[in-house]
Image: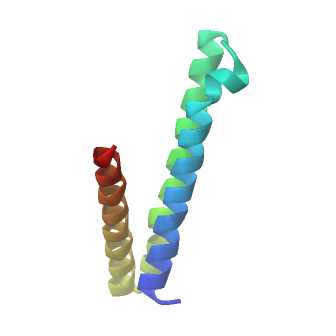
Amino acid sequence: MNNIKTATINSLGVLVYVAIVATVMTHAEKSFGKENPVIAGVGMLMLFTLSAAVVGSLIVGKPIMLYIDNKKKEAVGLLAWTLGFLAVITIIVLFYLGLK
């Protein structure tokens, strides 16, 4: 699979994951009710840790594997394409929010 296709899929994966987390967080109080603040804090930190792992895997997982396989140019290219697509997606989302 070429870098552009992989970067597009990974960037869209980040978008979908972030959308799911944002939706859960938006409806958390209605779904889970008022929780013990300590348990809520633990839950939020666990979600943060999981999110860092998932998004980190989507963004740098394959580039690290390519780099380890001594495909440094391809690894840097994939990371650059992925970050570029993420930047474009972020700009689109922020622009959309500005229109509301």
Image coordinates for residue 2, horizontal then vertical, percent: 47, 89
* Relative to 3, 22 lies left or right: right
Q: Nearer the viewer, residue 16 or 76?
A: 16
Quarter in which the C terminus is drawn: top left
State the residue at coordinates (71%, 22%): 32
Q: Is residue 94 left or right of residue 65?
A: left
Side of 50 relative to 69 (left or right): right
For the view shown, which residue lies furthest in the bottom direction? Answer: 2
The quarter of the picture where residue 88 lies is: bottom left
Compared to residue 98, the image places residue 87 above or below, namely below
- Identify the residue at image location x=31%, y=50%: 94
Q: Is residue 62 visible?
A: no
Q: Report the coloring of the rendering.
A: rainbow
Could you tell me residue 5's position as x and y percent? 48, 83
Viewer-closest of 75 and 47: 47
Residue drawn at 42 percent across, 78 percent down: 67
**In this orientation, does residue 10 appear?**
yes
Number of marks: 0
Left or right, 35 with reference to 53:
right
Q: Which residue is outermost to the right?
A: 32
| Residue positioned 50% across, 59% down in the render | 14
| Image coords of residue 12 (percent x, y) | 50, 66
- Above or below, comparing residue 50 to residue 39 in the picture: below
Q: Position of residue 65 (x, y in %)?
A: 50, 75
